[in-house]
Amino acid sequence: MSILLDSSSKVIVQGITGREGTFHAEQMLAMGTRVVGGTSPGKGGTTHLGVPVFNTVADAVKATGANASGIFVPPPFAADAIMEAAASGITLIVCITEGIAIQDMIKVKDFLRGYPAARLIGANCPGLITPGVAKIGIIPQNITSSGPVGLVSRSGTLTYEVASALTAAGMGQSTIVGIGGDPVLGLTFRDVIELFEKDPATTHLVVIGEIGGSDEEHAADLLARGSRLKTVAFISGRTAPEGKRMGHAGAIISGNRGTAKSKEEAFRKAGVAVAETTDDIVGLLK
Amino acid sequence: MKLLEYQAKEVLASLGIAIPPGKVARTPDEAAAACAELGPVAVKAQVPVGGRGKAGGIKLAKTPEEARAAAAQIIGMDIKGFKVPLVYCEAALEIEREIYLGFTVDRDARANILMLSAKGGMEIEQVAEESPESIARLYPNPWRGPLDFELNRLVFEAGLGELARPLTSLIKKLYRAIPELDAVTAEINPLVVTKSGEVIAGDAKLEVDENAAWRHKDLEQRYGGVLEGDPYEVEAKKRGLTYVSLDGEIGIIGNGAGLCMSTLDLVQRAGGRAANFCDIGGGAKAEVVQNALAVILMNPRVKGVLMNVFGGITRGDEVAKGLVTARDNLKMQLPLVVRLSGTRADEGRKILKENGIEPGASAWEAAQKIVELTQVTSPLAGEVPRSGGGGR
């Protein structure tokens, strides 16, 4: 079992003929993901990586019955690609693109209110993987293994670090979800944790947060109300100087909430173990 | 990009918002001339951070001589790490009352929030904490912007009903900064009502979204490059890197902001101090790695470099090739510790090994290694170790 993505998910790749789209669609196919097609305006009717290419998402959905999409298009077009996916009936939209304008994402969030069945992951995220089954995005499958640990993270590469350590320790993962580091994004920690709570195959949970915003605090509030998952949290950016922008637009300290200290305290209050370094996560989870 | 006050005011004026008469001065003589023309002025340091008043960056000048002296003191002073490049001399206002007006992105709501309060001028954060109800709030629809009745309601909720007409019109003008400039934060505090009843921007803060720079090339051309920021940050920006200077001695390169931040945390935990944050991001190519290393090695304080790359979209072989080439091109002799894993990491590690760079086993071990190599001063000559961990 898993959340969001399983062997029945029919996936398309928006931007499949691009460099990144091609590379990662290949990786997705290689691990057995049901990639049923892709889109690239003007290249409809051709075949790429052995799957059909369509001009629009609507065409792709009509022809293949796709219900999930991975988006690998450049930032100026990514917000539109998300809305196109939602309007075409895609219910799991994973946007990998980094650097989408904040105002574009605010419009996307408002637009998605009209499509309550559509779930957006990202943007600026590594996507998600259900080890041994399927993935949408860029998480390397060779560092994952199947098992009972749910992993949700705001960071990309830090997610790999932890997945790799879990795998090395023999603790497989049910699903790994990278929600992304932008200030305005799709699913939050809270949304993903609620899904893990309902997944019988998930018994453990790792939450990897970072400074900025208050999504971690909201997640801690949820866990404080009672959880069946054995949970460990880790927050990166303890030593980040205040007010300095660290690349993710989200990693800007604001108010009391948002600091590493505030987030760690919120998790501790919720009875969640807080790891000092990523190396400590495995030990605390056992 | 955070605009300086005079730049933000220029933008406000272009949106039709009244600003006091003012002049930019790069020298004390220019400040004296501005005062001679404008009368009594406030001489204000131009830096993209708050708290400049408390830092001595704002002085009142009644005469050109006073303005000259004030500018001489302020230009070149350091305010929270920013060297003041110039001052803005602005005509003093006859203040009747001070209002707060601003918008920003509410991350929790994933929306823009407009805020208006009759209690402007003082620390708005304190007002927000002590009497949050005195700040009226509105979440405008991002597709159509705020409607007239919504703005009217905002103004009355803030207790500013007697100013409904001028304020609704002014807020509409300010809001244009969102669709037209991709502003993510704008603040007029104080928004001054003068004794003659004019509503005028006393101060202005404006931040535009760098992710939207492709839509506004003119903004960067016009307003970028005024600040003499940290030389390494300036160079990094030229090379398109995400780089922040810190005050330690270990150069850091990582891919992904989270991994990079946790690498800083690990270095500190191991007893070292990072010289910088440098995120080479997803899809980083050989050229990017070389640029990152070049900028880090510009800093004479750097005694060694730790590179932590876990490949997803960044392919390990590309990173390794770039690193080897960069090291050779830059004739790097400082200790270099590399931690590489993920997509095509085996190929990458092979390239590193073939070129005499031993990859670190884990991020924590790599952090300890670089701290050891950069901190162990030889009892013989206090010499910095020049080999090990990968240096040649």
Image: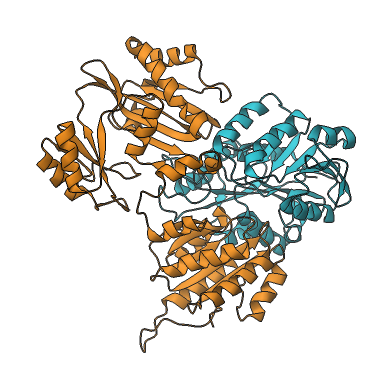
> From what the image shows, is residue A75 above or below residue B323?
above
In the picture as drawn, the residue positioned furthest to the bottom comes out as: B380
Residue B295 percent location from the top left of the image:
47, 65
Residue A173 percent location from the top left of the image:
73, 52
Residue B162 percent location from the top left of the image:
32, 10
> From what the image shows, is residue A89 above or below residue A284?
above
Residue A179: in sight, yes or no?
Answer: no
Q: Colour of chain A?
A: cyan
Q: Residue at x 60, y 35 (%)?
A: A105
Pick the front one: B202 or A69: B202
Left or right of A228 on screen, residue B210:
left
Residue A85: in sight, yes or no?
Answer: yes
Left or right of B218 on screen, residue B7:
left
Pick the front one: B387 or B23: B23
Q: Colour of chain B?
A: orange
Pick the front one: A269 or B246: B246
Tell me the quarter of the picture where residue B20 sits: top left
Tell me the quarter of the picture where residue A120 sits: top right
